[in-house]
Image (cartoon, rainbow, N blue to C red):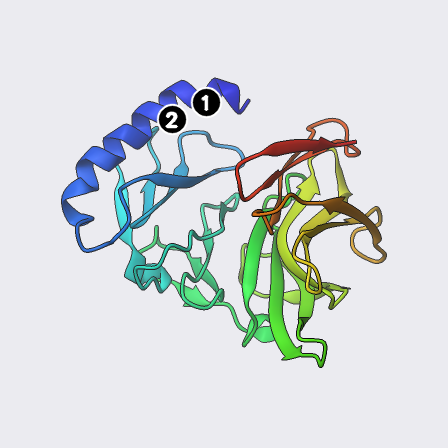
């Protein structure tokens, strides 16, 4: 469970930060952990997102490999990468520079850019399919134009890979009137997919798109966001109830939808 992992992971994160504090001075951000991806069947393998790159362990945190920002096309910005680890240990990460999808099969020594339908598009999130852990979903959201009313129109779609990021195809097109931000698959129902974001015409209008059929059709729900937020992120879907999910806003408030 998420709670059960906190104590050992906190110790592991602290160890990583102590190991690499000396090399973070070139980055303007304070050292910190920003995300976590766990191997779907082997809890000894962890990939940590850090403010200065990534850290990978395959042995419960006894040893770590540091992957610098440059390996994932970082430029010292405050963007944190979406990332997943597939069932064969492949690392799939979003580029820190332009949101391209990067894939590594050698523990982060090298990354290859995913091409095909992803080429030239900006990725905003990744999700691993719990029922098929060789399958990765990539949420793409790129500005196409700014309309006369002054707000952007987006090219939004979900692509998926069935072979650990080796090849990709478009799974679903999404409406162009929103900035798409996060994608999640319900652990208890792989056909239930959620995409969250905000309206391009009104950034305080949160949007949740729900598919019950694997992406073939979508139902929209809206959430009014408080002043100063302007983002809506799906944090989790209940492990046994696909109708229940949690989302967070940029001001660190957490809400629940049912």
Instruction: State left or right for residue 55 relative to residue 36.
Output: left
Assess whether mark 1 and mark 2 are in contact (beta carbons under 8 angstroms). yes
Which of 174/138 is in front? 174
Please, what secondary structure does the residue beneath circle 1 have? Answer: helix
Compared to residue 27, the image places residue 38 above or below, namely above
Q: Residue furthest front?
A: 227
The residue that disc 2 covers is 9
Q: Can the viewer see residue 35?
A: yes
Instruction: State left or right for residue 6 relative to residue 31.
Output: right
Which of 154/170 is in front? 154
The residue that disc 1 covers is 5
Q: Can the viewer see residue 162?
A: no
10 Å neighbourhood of mark 1: few (<14), some, or many (≥20)?
A: few
* Residue drawn at x 14%, y 44% as measured from the top left: 22
Please, what secondary structure does the residue beneath circle 2 have? Answer: helix
Which of 222/53 is in front? 222
Residue 229 at x, y percent in the picture: 58, 47
Which of 227/65 is in front? 227
* Residue drawn at x 19%, y 34% as measured from the top left: 18
Compared to residue 46, the image places residue 123 above or below, namely below
Residue 3 at x, y percent in the picture: 51, 20
* Residue drawn at x 59%, y 48% as measured from the top left: 127
Residue 175: quarter of image: bottom right
Pick the quarter of the image with the N terminus: top right
10 Å neighbourhood of mark 2: few (<14), some, or many (≥20)?
A: some
Residue 78 at x, y percent in the picture: 37, 54
* Residue drawn at x 82%, y 51% as measured from the top left: 220
């Amino acid at each position: 469970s998420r709670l059960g992992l906190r104590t050992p992971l906190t110790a592991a994160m602290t160890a990583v930060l102590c190991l690499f504090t000396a090399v973070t001075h070139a980055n303007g951000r304070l050292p910190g952990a920003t995300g976590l991806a766990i191997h779907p069947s082997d809890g000894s393998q962890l990939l940590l997102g850090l403010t200065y790159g990534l850290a990978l362990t395959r042995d419960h945190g006894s040893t770590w490999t540091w992957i610098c920002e440059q390996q994932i096309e970082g430029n010292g910005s405050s963007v944190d990468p979406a990332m997943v680890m597939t069932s064969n240990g492949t690392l799939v990460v979003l580029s820190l520079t332009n949101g391209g999808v990067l894939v590594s099969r050698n523990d982060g020594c090298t990354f290859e850019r995913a091409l095909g339908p992803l080429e030239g598009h900006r990725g905003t999130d990744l999700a691993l399919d719990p029922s098929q852990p060789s399958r990765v979903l990539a949420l793409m959201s790129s500005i196409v134009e700014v309309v006369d009313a002054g707000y952007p129109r987006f090219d939004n779609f979900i692509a998926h890979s069935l072979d650990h990021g080796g090849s990709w195809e478009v799974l679903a097109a999404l409406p162009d009137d929103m900035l798409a931000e996060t994608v999640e698959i319900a652990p208890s129902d792989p056909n239930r997919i959620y995409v969250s974001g905000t309206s391009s015409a009104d950034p305080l209008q949160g949007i949740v798109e729900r598919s019950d059929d694997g992406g073939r059709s979508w139902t929209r729900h809206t959430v009014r966001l408080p002043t100063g937020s302007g983002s809506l992120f799906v944090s989790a879907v209940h492990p046994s109830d696909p109708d229940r999910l949690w989302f967070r806003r940029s001001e660190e408030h957490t809400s629940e939808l049912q």
